[in-house]
């Protein structure tokens, strides 16, 4: 399995990001990824990506794209609602493939 780290962002950095994070783990494990999730609120994004080990940012609340510049940022509201998981999954797999992961 390929190890990746995903930043899950919601308004408070707790409930929604945890729910989305669990779903990301389930979806990406089916495609051969071992996923570590870090949950934050939008104000914590810049600090969370500063060490350079985040592969993807999944957000349900708006974030400043400049706070995670150079890291794929994918809207994950569909994972929260369960209505459009495929769009997130396709975007995540494409971004990971482009990174060589």
Image: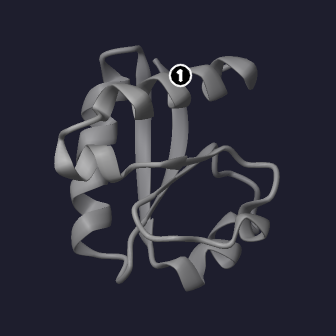
Residue indicated by mark 1 = 93
* Rendered image coloring scheme: one colour
Please indicate whether residue 38 sits to the left or right of residue 30 in the image: right
x and y percentages locating residue 55 in the rendered image: 63, 43
Frontmost residue, 85 versus 33: 85
In which quadrant of the rendered view does residue 26 lie?
top left
Instruction: Using residue 73 as the reference point, say whether residue 12 is left or right of it.
Output: left
- Mark 1 surroundings within 10 Å by alpha-carbon count, few (fewer than 14), some (14 through 19), many (20 or more): some
Residue at 34%, 53% (x, y): give it. Answer: 77
55 up-or-down from 13: above or below: above
In this rendering, the answer to whether 31 lies above or below 78 is above
Q: Is residue 57 above or below residue 85?
A: below
At horizontal 41% and vertical 53% (from top left) the residue drawn is: 37
Residue at the image position 68 percent from the left and 51 percent from the top: 53
Q: Please state the horizontal and vertical placement of residue 13, each as a whole percent of the image.
A: 37, 77
Element at badge 1?
helix
Closest to the observer, 91 or 20: 91
Residue 42 point in image, percent of width and height: 53, 78
Name the residue at 73% across, 20% down: 98
- Tally the marks: 1
Left or right: 95 with respect to 82? Answer: right
Q: In the figure, residue 101 lies in which quadrant?
A: top right
Q: Give left or right: position of 28 versus 64.
A: left
């Amino acid at each position: 399995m390929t190890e990746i780290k995903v930043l899950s962002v919601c308004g408070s950095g707790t409930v929604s990001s945890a729910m989305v994070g669990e779903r990301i783990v389930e979806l990406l494990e089916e495609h051969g990824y071992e996923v570590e999730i870090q949950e934050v609120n939008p104000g914590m994004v810049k600090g969370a990506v500063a060490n350079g080990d985040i592969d993807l940012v999944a957000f349900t609340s708006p974030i400043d794209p400049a706070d995670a510049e150079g890291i794929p940022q994918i809207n994950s509201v569909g994972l929260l609602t369960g209505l459009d998981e495929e769009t997130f999954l396709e975007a995540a797999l494409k971004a990971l493939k482009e990174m060589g992961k």
